[in-house]
Image (cartoon, rainbow, N blue to C red):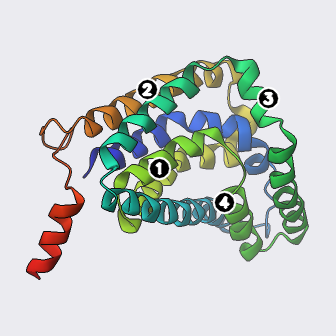
Amino acid sequence: MSPEILAAFVIGLFGSLHCIGMCGPIAIALPVPNSGNLSFFTGRVLYNLGRVVTYSFLGAVLGLVGGRIVLADAQQVFSIILGVVIIIAVLLPQKYKNYFAQHAFTQKLAQPLKSNIGVLFKNGTFSAMFLIGILNGFLPCGFVYIGLAGSIASGDAISGAAVMILFGLGTVPAMFAASVFGKFINLGIRTKLRKAIPVLAILLAAVFILRGMNLGVPYLSPKLPTQSEVSSEMDCH
């Protein structure tokens, strides 16, 4: 398992408390398709599955973009820049983060998604629960963007999708618990655990920077292929 995929799962798992704060209201308010307990839990499983599907799609797209960077002999530089950008984003004062989150463009992007989620809430079917998860995955979220950074660095569409699948699965336990026991989750504990997110993000940034340094350390900083090496390998086939 590559360091990006492993890091994505760990960040998803421990950083999912951020998801409860941002998307928790949606998860807690999910409708109940029927009165049976099985239907209650099935709907919430479908909601989380929808989120993971969206994450995997976005990861595949950005992994494909990352693959083009590999062929351009820019992967090393890009990996280092990506790590530095993540560190800057973590250290950025909260007022600037709030500015970006509340910017008109961000709100304009999110509004149609929120409107459609509202319509699906009134439906309350299993398919609606799945589609709510799909749309929820597209809502602007800085935490998800950290995971997507790993997809770009992965170098291809399949690896990019794998990064975000593991990231999404990491968020499922906390989000599922929020949808079932949301009213009982202690806000104080949630706030304390959310403080671990910057630490995890900086660790992921360190992985990107070390990877870009091309030190020849297996898994952590392996030798990255250049365009000429990739081309010669293709010619051999």
Q: Amino acid at mark 4?
A: Arg
Earlier sequence position, callout 1 versus callout 2: 1
Q: Is residue 174 left or right of residue 209?
A: right
Earlier sequence position, callout 3 versus callout 1: 3
Cβ–Cβ below 8 Å for labels 3 and 2? no
> Alpha-carbon distance for marks 3 and 1?
26 Å
**Foreground disc of the pair 3, 2:** 3
Which quadrant of the figure has residue 58? bottom right
> Alpha-carbon distance for marks 3 and 4?
32 Å
**Foreground disc of the pair 3, 1:** 3
Where is residue 180? Give x, y as percent. Answer: 68, 48
Which mark, residue 167? 1
Earlier sequence position, callout 3 versus callout 4: 4
Which residue is label 2 attached to?
A: 202
Which mark, residue 44? 4
Q: Quadrant of the C terminus?
A: bottom left
Q: Is residue 183 left or right of residue 236?
A: right
Q: Residues within 10 Å of mark 1 (few under 14, many from 20)?
A: many
**Foreground disc of the pair 3, 4:** 3
> Alpha-carbon distance for marks 1 and 2?
16 Å
> Alpha-carbon distance for marks 1 and 4?
18 Å
Which mark, residue 153? none
Q: Residues within 10 Å of mark 3 (few under 14, many from 20)?
A: few
Q: Amino acid at mark 2?
A: Ile
Which residue does the image show at 19% across and 70% down from the upper left? 231
Which residue is label 3 attached to?
A: 99
Cβ–Cβ below 8 Å for labels 1 and 2? no
Where is residue 116? Give x, y as percent. Answer: 86, 65
Q: Is residue 172 left or right of residue 31?
A: left
